[in-house]
Amino acid sequence: MDPWVHIIGGGLSGLSLASSLARFDDLPGRVVISEPNPEALASKTFSFWFSGDEEAFLRPQYSSSRWTLSDENHRVAHQGTRFQYGTRSGDHVLDSALQEIHNHPQIDLVHEFIDMRPKATHCFDSRPCAVDTFQLTQSFAGIEVIFEQPHGISEAGLMERMRPTDSGLQFVYLLPLGPDKLLIEHTEFTTRPADFSVLAALNDRYLRQEFANNPYQLVRTEAAHIPMGFKQRAQHLGIPIGARGGMTRDATGYGYRTIRYACDQIAADLVKYDVARPFRRSAVTTWADRLFLNLIENRPDIIPQILMQISHRMTPDRFAAFMMMRSPSDLIHMLRAAPAKPFTCALLGRYRWI
């Protein structure tokens, strides 16, 4: 008998959907997840903003109410009261999902590669899309280390040392995972995928410069290209989910929070109504992100200034709310804080006027 649900791809979105289905004891039929290498998820890191009542669902392992942004001349420090910045490791996501799948008699993870639509009542496609379909790319290379002495960083460095490049924006992301453990990621928002080896070399240089007298041990490395919008539509083998399904934020690359909530709703609709509803991103969010991506593409030289002004003028909680973009009011608060001229010119498509 054909499966009731077939999920192609066992990354974050595929396993999130399977985990949400696993919470129902009696499913209408069999669920299959096809993924040739589920262990690849273990090397990833997922970060997100959350409020206190969301902690049990989003399950952060590390959290901080403080985060910072900086360019070559200025630094903004935020301390949230309503929202915190949380992080969950890929191996934690993977271990939890595999346990839930193993404990459910109707859900199976199959180590296989699929490139054609399988027979099933409902089929979901969570495979990553080809980089050449991206409008812009968020490229990053990260290194997680443990120091012999405390590193002294107590807040998440969201976008530190921002500087424009000839193809976009470069910055370093700093995430303290404990008093002696730190994740360092050099990142680029770019019109062409960055070279991972160049970004990794920047991580090494940062460690030499900032922690010359604090020996460390390597824990792991990670690198990825994340879509920031798509310039062409990919061919799907079912209902798209994850980045393929528009569940990652085009302007930032954040996706964990949206993926968890969206997949939970999809699972509920499947079980209650036997209906598979595709994820629909807010038109307001899509419009705002497209405007920002066009600015990065056409005027990368002013992006650090724009981001610093926005973060300086917004309260920490309103900044976090905008990053989550839960309602149109979050966009309104951002536009009030942003410099008017760049966004007005971007609306008109007159980037030379900025």
Image (tube, grey):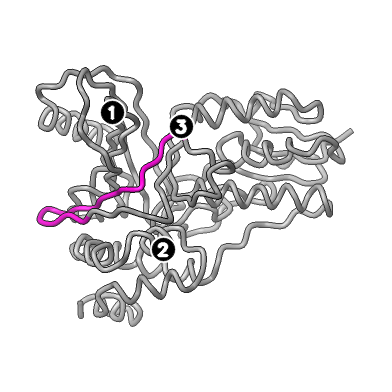
Disc 3 is placed on an element classified as: strand
Indicate yes or no whether the magenta region holds residue 67.
yes
Q: Is residue 219 left or right of residue 215?
A: right
The structure residue drawn at horizontal position 69% and vertical position 27%, both measured from the top left corner, is: 109
Query: Could you tell me what secondary structure mostly forms the magenta stretch?
Result: strand
Disc 2 is placed on an element classified as: helix
Residue at mark 1: 179
Tell me the quadrant of the picture where the N terminus can be found: top right
The structure residue drawn at horizontal position 28% and vertical position 47%, both measured from the top left corner, is: 188
Q: Around disc 3, counting alpha carbons within 10 Å, would you say few (fewer than 14), some (14 to 19), or many (20 or more)?
A: some
Of the numbered discs in the image, which one, if any, rests on residue 89? 3
Q: Earlier in the sequence, mark 2 or mark 1?
A: 1
Task: Identify residue type, mark 2.
Answer: Phe
Indicate yes or no whether the magenta region holds residue 318.
no
Disc 1 is placed on an element classified as: loop
Residue 164 vertical position relative to residue 220 in the rendered view, above or below: below
Task: Identify residue type, mark 1.
Answer: Pro
Of the numbered discs in the image, which one, if any, rests on residue 322? 2
Image coordinates of residue 11 in percent, x first then y, are 56, 36
The part of the chain drawn in magenta is 61-76
CB atoms at circles 2 and 3 under 8 Å apart? no
